[in-house]
Amino acid sequence: MTILRIAWRNLWRNPRRTGITIFSMSFGLTMMIVTYALMDGMYGQMVQFATILGTGHIQIHKPGYLDDRSLYETIDDPAKVLRVVDAAGEGHAAPRTYATALVSSGPQSAGGYIWGIDPLRERQVTDFQHHLASGAFLSEGEKGKVVLGHNLARTLSVGPGDEVVLLAQAADGSLGNAVFRISGVLQSIGETFDRTGVLMESDDMDELMALHGRIHEVAVRLTRPDRLTEALTRYKTLMAPMGLEVKSWRELLPELSEVLKLSSTSTTIVLFIIFAVASLGIVNTQLMSLFERTREIGVMRALGLGPIPVAVIVFLETIFMALISAIAGGAGGALWSWYLEVHGWDISNLGGSFAYAGVTFDPHLRASLTPPAVIQSIEIMLVVCVLATLFPLFKATRITPASAVGRGH
């Protein structure tokens, strides 16, 4: 108890220096928590954008379709697949067909990748309808209309209300061609889709490509994305009798999946480095304190106080500062992260949207405040504080009455 009182009293013998050290530690911890929460939120947004603007959480195909995306590798009974997926109750499903085509408008032409979709079901799986730059999204039963990707529309110099001609080789070997009116143009959602994407109603696709009701894919958006593993296992069991393969977004987007696997480790390393730099203030404070109290410690040693109690006093001083900083910095970091989670951080002025692994992300970042963001940051700070105080502890144990008196002269 006496050692605790001595350590606490020593801490405030130079309140300005102690206050500056606690402030720097608290600020460092606050930044650690905010950085952790922002990176967590950014990774969550990456997954959300990659799934709701393209892949969905799970996809069902004929085995081998993803290897070369052949027009002829189709699911022949999509109605049965959709019934089974709907009955599973894990989420919403949408059928899709794909084909390549030449898209023309006047003298301008470009390669296009057509998505034949069911607008009503697609609205429940993806959020294309909320990412329109102009015009309107496709409606159920509204034939003869298409929605174009951002860069494709710019290449063809067209917009909503204009017409484009699609020319493609159909599944029966004939040359399919038709005129479509542009219903809308999407915002930037991904490099490939921006450059080539064409959305059209599935019946129009069926007529253009002579697919006779066959589809290439069923995309699923899970009601609870955290149940991805369980839902994947269940769908694999349900689709096995029909000879179909089921893949999750982690298999469909391996680059993004690898980034997320490394995210936790890389975040911890970055935060450790940030606070390691801030810990230099702790080392400086403790060494300065020891230098000022060298004669006092020498007297204590002469009165019978051993090197271990002296080291304990110095250690407790660091722990007191760390605990005060943990409370102040933890509260500051949690409040700041909560604000960024609710209101977000618009970085569009720093260069607009950004893309990774072919997916364009919203420049409005949102933090994700979770208990690990606060607890792990505090744990890192305490570990760094203990490591930072090792050298001052060693110096404290080396002080003897003779050396203390000698330094005083």
Image (cartoon, grey):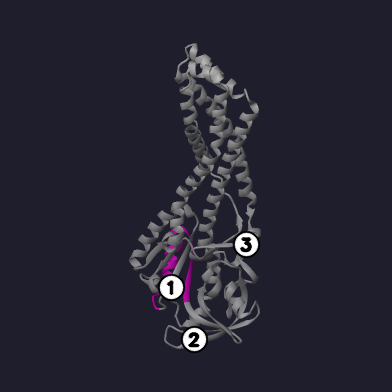
- Seen in the picture, residue 315 relative to 41 is either above or below; the reply is above
Q: Residue at point 57% right, 26% down?
A: 289
Q: Residue at point 40% right, 63% down?
A: 247
- Between the C-alphas of marks 3 and 2, the distance is 39 Å
CB contact under 8 Å: marks 1 and 2: no
Quadrant location, the C terminus: top right
Neighbour tally class for label 3: few under 14, some 14-19, many 20 plus, Cα within 10 Å: few
Of tags 3 and 1, the one toward the viewer is: 3
Disc nearer the start of the sequence (3/1):
1
Look at label 2 and name its amino acid.
Answer: Gly
Q: Is residue 82 magenta?
A: yes
> What residue range appears in magenta?
72-98
CB contact under 8 Å: marks 3 and 1: no
- Between the C-alphas of marks 1 and 2, the distance is 18 Å
The residue that label 3 is drawn on is: 352
Q: Position of residue 20 (x, y in %)?
A: 63, 33
Q: Position of residue 253 (x, y in %)?
A: 45, 62
Disc nearer the start of the sequence (1/2):
2
Q: Residue at point 55% right, 18% down?
A: 295
Q: Nearer the viewer, residue 214 or 162?
A: 162
Q: Nearer the viewer, residue 95 or 374?
A: 374
Neighbour tally class for label 1: few under 14, some 14-19, many 20 plus, Cα within 10 Å: many
Look at label 1 and name its amino acid.
Answer: His
Of tags 3 and 2, the one toward the viewer is: 3
Look at label 3 and name its amino acid.
Answer: Gly
Labelled disc at residue 176: 2
Can see residue 352?
Answer: yes
- Seen in the picture, residue 329 relative to 202 is either above or below; the reply is above
Q: Is residue 348 left or right of residue 380?
A: right
